[in-house]
Structure formats: structure tokens, C-alpha cells
Image: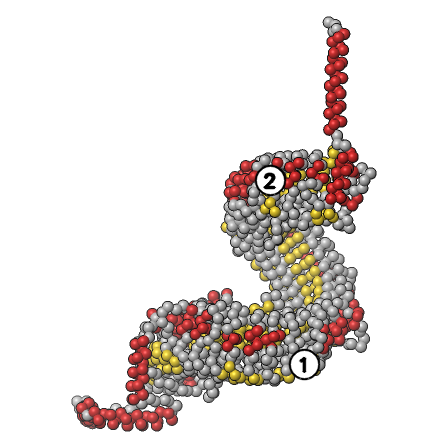
Amino acid sequence: MRIPLFSWLFLILIYYVSLSVHVFVVVSSQCPSDDQQSLLLQLKNSLEFDSAKSNKLKQWKNGSDYCSWEGVSCKDGCVSHLDLSSESISGGLDNSSALFDLRYIENLNLAYNNFNNIQIPSKFDKLTDLSYLNLSNAGFVGQIPIEIAHLGRLVTLDFSTLYYPGTPSLKLENPNLNVLIGNLSELVELHLDGVNISARGAQWCQAISSSLPKLRVLSLSASNISGPFDSSLLKLHTLSVIRIEKNNLSTQVPEFFSNFTNLTSLRLSSSGLYGTFPEKIFQIPTLQTIDLSGNSQLQGSLPEFPKNASLQSLVLNGANFSGQLLPNSIGNLKMLSKIDVPSCNFTGSIPRSMENLTQLIYVDLSMNKFNGSVPFFSMAKNLTQINLSYNQLTGQINSSHWENLTNLENLDMRHNLLDGTIPPSLFSLRVLQKLQLANNQFSGQLLGFATISVLDTLDLSSNHLEGPIPMFIFSLRELKILSLPSNNFSGSFPLNSLQQLKNLSSLDLSYNRLSIDYNDINSSHSSFPNITTLKLVSGQLRIFPNFLRNQSKLSTLDLSQNQIHGEIPNWIWRLNNLFQLNLSCNSLETLEGPLLNVTSSLSVLDLHSNQLQGQIPLFPQFATYLDFSENYFNSSIRNDIGDFLSYTIFLSLSSNKFQGIIPESICNASNLQVLDVSNNSLSGLIPKCLTAISGTLAVLNLRRNNLSGTVPDKFPEHCSLKTLDLNGNQIGGQFPKSLANCTMLEVLNLGNNHIADTFPCLLKNISTLRVLVLRSNKFYGRIGCPKPHGNWSMLQIVDIAHNNFSGKLPGKCLRTWQAMMTDDNDTMSKLNHLRFEVLKFGQIYYQDTITVTNKGLEMELVKILTVFTSIDISHNKFSGSIPAEVGELRSLYGLNLSSNALTGTIPSSLGNLRQLESLDLSNNILGGTIPAELAKLNFLSFLDLSNNQLVGKIPVSTQISTFSAASFGGNKGLCGPPLTLRCSNTSGSPHAAQKPPNKVSGIGFDWPSIYTGLGFGVGAGVIVILLILWEEGRNWLEDSIDRILLVILPMMGFTYKTRDEWNEEEEEDFEEESAYIMEDCDTDENESEDKGFRGTYCVFCSKLDMSRKRAIHDPGCTCHLSPRISSSSSSSYSFSP
């Protein structure tokens, strides 16, 4: 069949027309090159950027191919990719920018610039082809515009930024997250780190899961979102990366996270997670990275890892895996390169299977409880970091541990129990930069050899290393930090050799047996390195090294405990960067001339324990810590002292010879936390403003001066005092009632003054009180307190001896003294001592010291251990029986109830006081037998039961046999060793004198004895009847007896009160009892005033063995006459900058 010619022509015409249309469309779709280049140049000219730091924009020039410009890519002549990241752009982007005319851009990156806190322009909706938009860390702030929601082709959206609290940030309020992503169904990656979303778990979880079905990467760190995780997230089947860090989620990690079968990275650090972490998540086959660090309430354990696991990075820093072990199956993680699990409370040994992990690069197992030996990591040839510090690892390390570790840069095994010698091969590791083996038990000499090394840090402090410091140290030319203190190094150290270590910045050789040698003649000051920290404590140094005068960068200088004498040179005060200076414990006498033109920024100055005299120097302008104690300063304290203490936190002028008054200007030191002017000759009144300091003052120590007057009753409502020590002055008046405002008080020492008042019940509300000393004052009355009052659960030392307290001992109150009731295991776990931290980062403390007097001997506790407990209520007028509740104070070390008028028997419950070292019940009216339970007190080193009315046999035990007869003297009814009086075999009473049997009549009556008894009986009866009926004769007889006893008893060391004095006191007691409302713990009836007893004083010859918490008794210790010595507390300081 033939087609007509006309038909052929028609088909040709149609083809030509369609071809023309196609060509026209193709040509029309291409972008005019002039327009694209012009727009790019307009964009460049409008942007503000630093051309010196630009690598892209500065190369854009007219006339060249714009598609080849740096940061630009094209498709068919149209700009499709524009990357202007990290170009130091600071402005020039607004809605009129030429950027928004480049309408064919698919990929736009403006990250890491600084647009100076402007809002994101709203014209981004014109870039409808965008699939990738990155505005991260570009300096944008404020509300994210709703126009972003119109970019429906977006695959990646990144608005993340580094957020700092208090700085402006991006936010999603209107529109919120739901509106922003509602139309972005193609989105695969969403990065909103640092954007303030402010949404709860159900809101943000459901918004994301319902709008982003293709999402693979979800990053919402520091976005102010909260928990809990909603199960709607399970809709995101392709989710691979979850990064939700630094939020306050306050939730548990759900079990359904283990159903994300494509998960490769899970980062949930510092998000307030708690509960138990699901083990199944660790076993996700695709998981490569997991980070749970910074969640201290998150618990859990590591599972058995399968052999096909993909895990490469395991970070659990700070999570609480208490008591758990590292599983041996961790050796199955063949791809593991980073294990970071410090402070996780892991226990047990480090699995040996870790030795087979060949891909390891970073290992941090520090601050756990690992024990056993150090594993071998020699197969991990790429290992750069090993940190095993702060564990309990034991054994030795040798050269084989470090074979093949040619890339090791940092080895940290501080604070373990490692011993043996340090292998010399460690110093041959060519790229090792830091070697830290401090606080172990390494011994022997330090051996090594000169080699090419990049070692910059060598810390071997607090070991048992000995011998000379080897000379190869001076070949470590890159060394910056050399720390060798607290070892047994000996010999001389040539300080001049430091000139070889040009990079040295920190040197610490303290607390060795070294002799520091310095020769100023053969050294050039300019050739020494620029040192910032120099510590040569206890180095037998005799002079100030003169090269220090040129050390312009020196910030810390500690030359304490040396033999430097003479003057402190002026050039020290002109070291501009000097921050800490410790010259204590030398023989320095004077300052070289006046301190003029002082330019140093000195903050910590310690000159204690020298021989400095005269007036104290002008204080450095910015000083925070000043210690001039234990010198010979003998002037008065300058009246304007407070004007120099604007920044001062700690000031000690104690143990000098200061005279005069305490100037009121000292109250101008508004930041003062510790003021110690004890052990001087200061007089006058305590400034009223001193006790009124609010919010800062924690320690006020004015003891052992001649201060008079009263304690100013001005303690503020927000009192911050922790220690108040006024012992050994002439202070009188009443107890300051406002002291009850000091609710943080721990140590109160008002001993050896003239304060006259009743027991300070107001202190009962201070639950933190640990030490209470009211000794040798004029306190009187009962020690029970009316309702309502708190308790002293932390009280450990009570000394109210030598007062006029009376009444019964409130037994039930003793049950609230919980610190004295802890058992042996509890005290071991709480072994510590009282101290106040002055400078947190400088390890500087104020440390209380208390002097406890026990039977005539002062025992000074240089540190008040929290396990030391003592009660001394001797030399008062207490009556009644010893409460059985005393036996519940199981951790008591010292108990002194002597010289009172206590009656009844010795409670057998005292046998429960197994820690007791000293027991003094002498000079009372105790009766009955000595309880056999006292024989069980194995640590009793002092015992005095003398001058009572005890009877029976003295219990037999090894411990009691160590005490002399004087411990039991004055008890006529006692018998048995160590007394010479033997006991009868049947009754345990002393033998009666053996008399020959009387010859009696046949019927057995002893008539002479009967007649004698009958005569005495009739005579006594007549006298009694006569006295009953004859009142005048009765009074005469009683007065005669009073006169006789008033002469005889004082000669025997006793006091006696007449019948009239007894009657007057009974009337006073009756009136006092009527007005006194007693607490449940003090319901005992009022009794008559007690007799006072005086006797000899015995030495307390035990001390506390810190290693065993036990008493050590000196067998050579004896009792002797001694004057009464008061109890007091003092201070000492620990300075370790």
C-alpha cells in the first residue's frame, strides 16, 4: 500500500516542528553564563569577610570560568553546589542578597562562619531545588523562619551550633518543630544540635516519627528537650544514628532501642539518664559507637559480646556500673579501637582477652576498682593512649609490656599498688610524650640511658625510688614537667644543670633526701629555662638561687623546709607573674628594705615558722592566703589592716608576740573565711563586728590571748561559722544566745574562761556539732534540755569538766549521740579528720587541733579524727547512777566521770565499749562489785576506780593485770590482785582476822559478849529517845558534829557542808525543779547537791594507732600528782600549692 505524497510531507512537517520545540526548550533551560557569574560576584561583593583567612571568595575573579571557582559546582551552566564554609564571613547576608537569585542551587553550605548573631533570612524558600542545607555554627540566632518548611526536597538539614549558656541561640517556637518538619518527608539527616526546641518526649518523638519516615540521622544534642522516649520512634525503621546528648531527659533508656536493627551510633551522654541500661542494646549487630558518659545515675552491666559484633567505640565515662566486671567476651570485639570507661565502679581484674584486641588505639580504664596485674597490650601496635590510673592494680611491669607499642604517646598508671623497678625500656619509646607512674610502690634506682626522646612529662612522685637522680634525665631535651617528690632519692642535685633542659617549665624535687646544689658563679641567668613552677621543699637549700630573679614567668615557688637564713630579697616581690610563694619553715629573719614598687600578683603567701620580727609587712594587693604564724612579730596589729585584705580568704597571725587590741578594721575584710590570731598577747574586747560577719567567716580562732569582756551576742541570721575557738582568755558574762544562728558549727571551744550560765540547750538545734568544749568555766545547773530540741548525731568530743553542773546524767539523751555509737566497721569506712578547705584548687586547708586533757596529761590531736570520741564531765556535781545507756556508745575512746557524787553500781553495759582506751570513775560514791564485763576491754590503757565504795573481788584478766593497785585504792571492800588484800574462797570478800575459838559453857553461849551487846543497846536506846524528845539537845549535838567535821575533812582533801548549807541548797533545788520542764530523756527526780571530791591526777598514756585504729599503751606510764590542765583546740594548716 502506498502512502500519498501529501501524507509524507505532513509527517515531515510535524517532525520538524517537534524537533524545533525540543531544541528551544533545551536551550532555554540552560543558565546564561553572564547572569550566573554576575550573581556570584554580586554575592562576593555584598558579603563581609576576612580576605586574609579566606580560601575561596578571594579567588573569585571576573573573566574566569565561574564553575571552576573554589566552592562552586555547576550543572548545565547553573550553579548547583555552593560551599562557603569556614570563610570568616561576618555579615552581608539579608533577604536582598544575590544568593537567593541562584535558584538552581541544590547544595548550600555556609557553616563555620560568624554572621554576628543575625536571624536567618526568610528568602530561603526561593531556593526550591535545595536538597542539602548546612547553616551550622554560622552565627545565626533567633527564630528559624517558617519558609524553611517549604523546602520539600531537602534530604539533609543542619542548623546545629555550639551552645553556651547565657548566649543567644537558634530556637523553634513559632513555627515549632512539628511545623518546621511537617512537609520535609524526604529528609534523611536532621541536625538541630544547640537549637532551643523546648519540647517534651511525646511531642518531639511523635513529630519526628510522623513526618520523617526516611530519617537515618537524628541529632538533637543540647536542644532543651526532655523525656521520656516515646515508642512512636519505632516507625523510623531506617534510623542509623541517634545523637541526643547534653539534654535533661530525666528518663530511662527504653528496651525498644534494641529493635533499631540498622543502628550504628548511639550517643546519649550527659542527659540525666537513670535506671538500668538494657543489655540488648550493646548486642545490636550493626552498632559501632555507643556513648553513655556523664550519666552518673545510669546503672547496668556489660553483656556477653557475640563474635560478630561491630563495636568500635565504647564510652561509658562516669556511668555507674557499680560492682560489675568487664566480661571476658570483650575480647570478641575485634574491631574495638576505643574503650573509655573511667569512673564506672568496675571491679575485678582486667580481662586477659583484651590482649588480643589488635585495633585498639585508645584505652582509659582509670578511676575504677580494678585489681590484679597489668595486661599486655603489645599486639595493639596502633595504641596511642593507655590510662589505668586510680585503680588497685598490683605486681610489676617489665619491658615485655611495651614491646611493639611504637605509637604509644601517653602512659598513665598513677595511684595504683604497682611495685618492682621501672623498666628502662620505657624511656626508649620514641614517640612517648607523657609517662605518669606517681603514687605507686616502685622501688630501686631509676635506670635509663641517653636517647632521642620526645618525652615532655615525667611524673614519678610518691614512690620508693632511691639512689641519685640519674644524669640521663638531662638528655630529655623536650622535657617540660619533671615531678619526682616524695621518694627516697639521695645525693646532690646540680641545679645548674637545668640549663640543659631548655623547655622545662615545672620542676618538683620536694620531700627527698637530696642536697640541692647551686653555684651562682658558673651560671648564666639567661641560659636557664623559663620555669613556671619550682618546688624544692626539704632540699637542704641554704640560699635563694639567684637565677630566679630573672624568671619572669615563675608563678609557683616553694622553698619551704630548707635551711635558708637571713633576709628575704626584694626581687622576689617584683616577679610579675608570681602567684604562690611558700618560704615557711626556714630561718628567715628580716625583709630586705621596704617593700616599694611591688609589682607581683601574689595571691598565696606562706611565711610561717621562721624568725621574722618587728612589724608584719604590707600585704600584697590581691592576696587571698596569708600565713605569718609562728614567728617573732612583736608589734601591735596595725589599725588599718582591714584595708589591705579586700581579697583575703585566709589570715593567720597566730603564735607570735602581738600585743594591743584586735582592730575593728579587720571586719572590712569582706571575703575572709579563716581568721586565726591565737597564741598571742592580745587584750581588750572582741570587736562586736567580728561576730557579726555574715555569709563568709567559717573559722574564728582567738584562743590563748588576754581578751576580756563578753562574747558579742551579734552572730547573724546567716552565720557561716564552722569553728569558734575562744579558749584560754578572760571572757565572762553569759553564753551568747545568737550563736544558735550558726547552724553549720562543727567545733565550739569556750574552755578556760569565766562564762557563767546554764547549759547552752540552744546548741541542740545545730546537728553538725562535733566538738563541744566548755571546760573550766562557771556553768551550772542540769545538762538536760526542755522540749523541743534537736539532737547531736555527729557529736564526738564532749568536755564540760571543771564546772558546777549538777543533777542526774540524762541517759536517754546519750542515745542521740550516734557518732559515738557506730561499730568498728562503720568507723573504718568513715576514717577521716576535720578540716576546712580554704582554696579548693590549691589543696590548702585549715585544720583544727584539739588538746584533750585526761587525768593530768595533755594529749594533742594534731588532726581531729572522725573516729576519735571522748566524754569528760569530771569535777562537777553530778549525782545519781551512771546511765546504762553509756554502754551503747560503742566507739567511745575516753570516758571520764571522776570527781562527782555518782552512786549506785558500775553498769555492766560498759563492757560493750570495746574501743575504750581510758576509763576514770574515781572519787565518786559507787558501790557494788566491779562488773566482770570490764575484763573484756582489751584496749583499755588507763583505768581509775579509786576512792569509791566498791566491794568484792577484782575481775581477773590480762588487761586488768596491767594496772597498779592505785587504780583500785580507797575501796575498803575490794580484794584480789593487784591489791595485796586476798579474798576468801567462798564469798569473795576480804579475809577476816583469824581468832582463836572462845571457850564457852557447856550449852555454847558466850555470855560476856551477850552482856556487852545488851548494855550498848540499852544505852543507845536511851540516848535516841532523849534526842527525839529534847530538841535543844538534838540541835547542840548536830552543831558539835558539824564543827568537828569542818576541821577534820578538809585536812583529808574533802569538802563538807553544814546542816544549814544543806537546807538552803535543798530549798533552792526545790524552787529550781518546780520551774524546770524536763525532756523525756531527763525525767530523773531532783536530788540534793553533790559533794565534791578531789584526788590525784593520772597520766593518759595511750595514743591512736592509725593503721589499726587501736590504742597503743605505754607500759612505762605512771600516775603522779599534777595540776589541772585545761582542754583547748588549736589550728594547723596544710599548704601544698
Q: Which corner quadrant of the image does residue 17 belong to?
A: top right
Asked whether disc 2 touches disc 1, contact meaning CB atoms under 8 Å apart, the reply is no
Q: Is residue 284 visible?
A: yes
Looking at the picture, how far across and down is residue 1110, in whole percent? 50, 73
Is 833 situated above or below 998?
above
Residue that appears at 76% across and 60% down = 453
Count neighbours of disc 1 (C-alpha within 10 A) and say few if under 14, some if 14 to 19, many if 20 or more: many
Kind of residue at disc 1? Leu
Q: Nearer the viewer, residue 754 or 774?
A: 754
Q: Which corner quadrant of the image does residue 1056 belong to?
A: bottom left
Looking at the picture, how far across and down is residue 1024, in whole percent? 20, 90
Q: CA distance from mark 2 to mark 1?
A: 74 Å
Which residue is the site of mark 2? 146
* Residue at the left extreme, as displayed: 1003
Looking at the picture, how far across and down is residue 732, in whole percent? 45, 82
Residue that appears at 66% across and 56% down = 386
Count neighbours of disc 2 (C-alpha within 10 A) and say few if under 14, some if 14 to 19, many if 20 or more: some
Q: What label does residue 588 carry, if any?
A: 1
Is 585 situated above or below 363?
below
Q: Nearer the viewer, residue 595 or 525?
A: 595
The secondary element bearing badge 2 is classed as: helix
Kind of residue at disc 2? Ile
Is 502 situated above or below 1023?
above
Quadrant in which the N terminus appears = top right
Quadrant in which the C terminus appears = bottom right
Answer left or right for 377 relative to 1123: right
